[in-house]
Every structure is written in C-alpha cells, then in structure tokens.
Image (tube, helix red, strand yellow):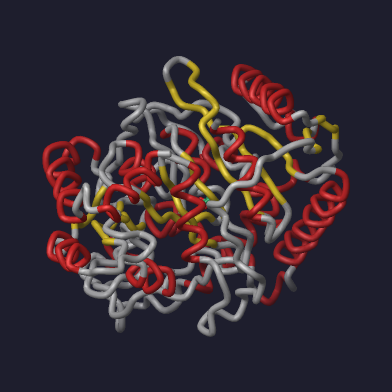
Amino acid sequence: MVIKQKLEKIKSGELSAEDNIKQFLDKIKAEDEKINSFIHVNENALEEAKAVDKKEKKGKLAGLAIAVKSCISVTDLPTTCAAKTLEDYKGTFDADVIEKIKAEDGIIIGMTNMDCFACGVSGESSMFGNTDNPKAPGHIPGGSSSGSAAAVAADFCDIALGTDTGGSIRNPASHCGIVGVKPSYGRVSRYGLVDMSMSLDQIGPLCKDVYGCALMMEIISGKSDYDGITFDKAVKDYSNFKEAKGLKIGISKDFEKLCTDERVQKLINEQIEKLAKATGSETKEISLKYVDLAIQAYYPIVYVEVFSGTRKFEGRKYGKKIEESCSEEVLRRILGGKEISKAEHDGAYYKKALLTKKLITQDFNKAFEDVDVILTPVVPRLPHKFGEKLSVNEMYAYDAFTSPANLAGICGASVPAGTIDNIPVGVQVLAPAFKEDVLFNVMNSLEE
Ligand code: GLN
C-alpha cells in the first residue's frame, strides 16, 4: 500500500508535501525527455505544495502529486487534447473532478500526453510526439491515456487521471503494469472534460496500487449539477476494502474467442484460478453472445458523437479549425460520423449500433444475476513496437475486451497480472453498474 503509507507520512509530518512534489519535479526534469509523458508541467506545483504544508488540517490527498490527462480542464493549464487545434488553449475553469481534487489538497503536477482528442489505443497519434512505455521501452504504452499511465509507471506522480471511452484507462494501465479504473457511466462528472464520445466517456484514476485508485474514486465520484447524467447514488468508502470471500466469478467463452495471443489468455486463467482459490470462490461460465459485436457497435456511435462534439472547433472560438489541425484518426471519425449521420441514411448505421449496445447491456445484466464479477484479459495481445505499421482494424481490435463495458455502462478495471516476455499484462475485472465497492474488493484480493 504505497499511497496509504505515504499519506500517513505526510499527515504525521514525517514527509512534507513540498519534498514529495520536489522529488517528482526533479525526476520529471531528468527523465521525461525520454518518455514524453507530460505535455506541460505545472510551474506553481511547488508553491501549492508549500501552502498545503502550512495547513493544520489537511485533506484526503494531502500533497499528493496528481497528473491530469490533457482533455480535462484545469484553470490556467493547457487543455490541448494533444491536438494542434488547441495548442494555445488554456483551461478557463476547473472541471468538477479537479475542483474536488484541489479541495482535498491534491497538487496538479502537470498535463499528460495522450492520443489526439482521446482517439487511439497506442499514444502514437499525439501531435506532441509518442510516449514511450517505461516498463517495456520501445513498445507503445497503450492509449489514449498514454501519458497518464506512463507518468505513474515512471514514478513521476502519485496518481493520474485518464479518460475511458472504449478502454483508454484500462488499456494503458495493462501495458504499463499499473492499476486503472473505468467508473460506471454516470458515476463521475464529465463537466470540464472535452467530449470524445459523450454517451460513453468517463474520467477515472490510474495508480500503482488499488488503494490509490479507490481513494481517488471516493473523491471524484458523485452527482453533479453540471452533468445531467450523473446519478444520485451513494458513494461508498471504496478504499475501506472488505474481504472478498465466496464469490461467483464469471468467465466466458464468448470473450475468450476474442483473445488473439494464447499466452495472454493462459496468464489470465492462472490469475482467475489463484483468485478463486484464495477467496474460496467458484467460477461460472456465462453467456455474452453479442460481445463479439462490441467493436462494430462502438465505432458508429463514436464516429457520430465525435463529429457532433467537435463542431465547436470551427476555428473562431477555440484555436484552429479541427479538420485542418487534428490527427488522421480524428479526421477519419469526423468524416465518417458526418456520413453516417446524414439524413438520407435514416439512422441505418447509428440505430443498428444503438440496438447492439442495448443487446450487449442486457446480456451483461443477465450475466450479473448469476455472478458477482467477470474476469477477462484487458487487451487481446501484447503491445506492438514503435514503427510497426498496423491496419485501422488491427488498432481497433485492441479494444475488444474493454469496449463492451463502456457500451453496457458497467464499471471495470485493470490490475497487473504478470508479464510475458518482460511486458506487463493486466487482468480485467468487470462489475455491475454502480458496484464499484465490489469491484475494488476483488481488485484488492487480486493485488494481494
Ligand atoms: N481506442 C478507443 C478509441 O480509439 C478508445 C478510446 C478511449 O477510450 N478514449 O476510440
């Protein structure tokens, strides 16, 4: 429990917030040129830490260094989305999640690199250069929250925020050997987040340990008057783990079929067996018969929503016109979304995709009548090396295991499961919507 112990040290005065932030800033300065996890480092971080040290009663994040994905608005810090479109744009307000972090004395250490407008799985589509994988140099760190995952893995911060629309927190967490959580849809306010696909996006934490993610989730979760889809459901003390005992663990052949590297599935199966043994749980085969359609349903929805959400970037209010200043992948989605949503198609593609989304949701709801959690790999393969050329479809296939949770609105996480050829691999835990407490208890058992 790295984060818990550090917080105790800061609260008891054994470690100052200033020293905590300073050692991260020094490390970033010395090592981030190689990794490129930050687009911007907050020059005021040290002063802000000193102010926390002066406080008699410190908040729950007392001087911890928090890295923020560059699509979340922080007052006066660049919210670039790693796009040329917004390269000169600075946040004019704090997103709901940032307001909550600051209220608990977390220090925003900087804004992280990412795939342009959160569209991607590899970190290679940032317009500010690739982010390297600190745990497997020369390989992609995963994306789109590439910088956030790399910053945690490289010890440049305590906790990072990412966003997950189809896997962008869990996927880089898996490749970088850390923990990452995608909250249930509507658990965390999206106010102040630049939309990628608004019916699927959620902000969530990345950290080296489960405790840090659980603590961050307690802080950022809850209803917001500024985000109409947040739900008024109680936020539990997720970091106060209860022992997971006698679980019903769901496993699914429908999912297994999607794994393209046998070694990955084998490693995950071993983890499932270990967890079952340690917690006196049983595994149960469940049917998710539409899960292989997740990618096909995900992209029409995303294309249409990316097209719609980016119409505000026409060049007058925010920097440059997006079509002239974004990555190839973003442009593909804008043009594709424009086509799909044309009146003459009468919703043919979009409506089909929404119907499939519903079928996948129903399948999960039914499965969760019989099991507490479902365990799968996070990613069906190992991360590729920089320079390897993948087709668009090969890129999209990275999200076969993660996008179903976004479509179904349930919560999910990646927890380190081991390595293959020295490359980290994560196990995915899925739990019903708003059962983050169950999710964290199982994650905690997996970590132990
Ligand atoms: N890789 C997926 C995409 O490109 C997911 C991105 C995300 O979760 N932000 O759409």
Identify the residue at image location x=15%, y=49%.
19
User: Above or below — where is 370 with respect to 255?
Assistant: below
Number of residue marks:
0
Taking the image as shown, residue 9 lies to the left or right of residue 16, namely right
Left or right, residue 200 beside residue 20: right
Horizontal side, residue 24 vs residue 100: left or right: left
Across and down, in percent, residue 291 comes to: 76, 44
As rendered, which of 163 and 437 lies closer to the eye? 437
Residue 190 spot, x, y in % from top left: 50, 71
Q: In the depicted view, which residue is nearer to us: 275 or 260? A: 275
Q: Residue at x 59, y 36 (%)?
A: 378
Q: Is residue 257 left or right of residue 87?
A: right
Front residue of 253 and 87: 253
Q: Position of residue 156 (x, y in %)?
A: 25, 43
Q: Specify the quadrant that holds the C terminus.
A: top right
Picture layout, residue 394 above or below residue 165: above
Q: Is residue 254 above or below residue 230?
A: above
Quadrant in which residue 207 is drawn: top left
Q: Residue at x 45, y 15 (%)?
A: 421
> Can you tell which quarter of the image residue 273 is in?
top right
Question: Can residue 323 be seen at all in this image of the molecule?
Answer: no
Residue depicted at 51% across the width and 23% down the height: 418
Q: Is residue 85 visible?
A: yes
Q: Position of residue 8 (x, y in %)?
A: 34, 49
Q: Where is 313 relative to 280, above or below?
A: below
Q: Quadrant of residue 336?
A: bottom right
